[in-house]
């Protein structure tokens, strides 16, 4: 589930499959590159993807490329 507004986006699965991954990520433009080749709006969005991926696979998989 992704619900947008001007100030923030609430990220989280609508089925609550991963409730521990629910978070509010502010849309500040501080982009970070993941080692998966994906550009994230900021670290919060990368952390969200890691949480969901970690729940699915048992470990977080994406790191920030400096």
Image (tube, grey):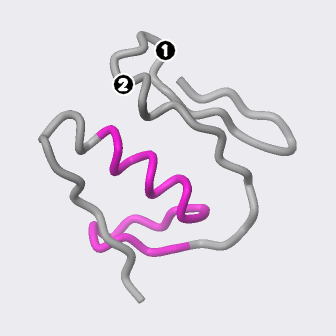
Specify few, some or many for label 2: CA neighbours under 10 Å numbering under 14, 14-19, or 20 or more.
Answer: some
- Which residue is denoted by mark 2 in the rendering? 18
In the image, residue 62 above or below residue 52: below
Q: Would residue 1 be counted in the magenta stretch?
A: no
Image position, residue 54 (x, y; %): 23, 44
Between disc 2 and disc 1, the foreground one is: 2
Task: Farthest residue to the left: give it.
Answer: 57
Answer with left or right where residue 11 lies relative to residue 8: left
Span shown in magenta: 32-52
Answer with left or right where residue 15 lies relative to residue 36: right
Residue at 42% of width from left, 10% of height from top? 15
Residue at 18% of width from left, 34% of height from top? 56
Image position, residue 17 (x, y; %): 34, 17
Does the CB distance between marks 2 and 1 fall below 8 Å? no
Image position, residue 50 (x, y; %): 33, 51
Q: Which mark is residue 6?
A: none
**Nearer the observer, 13 or 20:** 20
Secondary structure of the residue carrying numbered label 1: loop
Answer with left or right where residue 17 lies relative to residue 16: left
Task: Farthest residue to the front: give it.
Answer: 20
Residue at 76% of width from left, 43% of height from top? 8
Secondary structure of the residue carrying numbered label 2: loop
In the image, residue 35 above or below residue 7: below
Specify few, some or many for label 1: CA neighbours under 10 Å numbering under 14, 14-19, or 20 or more.
Answer: few
- Which residue is denoted by mark 1 in the rendering? 14
Image position, residue 11 (x, y; %): 56, 34
């Amino acid at each position: 589930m992704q619900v947008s507004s001007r100030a923030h986006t609430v990220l989280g699965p609508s089925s609550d499959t991963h409730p521990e991954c629910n978070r509010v990520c502010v849309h500040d433009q501080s982009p970070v590159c993941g080692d998966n080749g994906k550009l994230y709006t900021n670290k919060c969005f990368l952390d969200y993807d890691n949480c969901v991926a970690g729940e699915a696979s048992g470990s977080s998989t994406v790191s920030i490329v400096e």
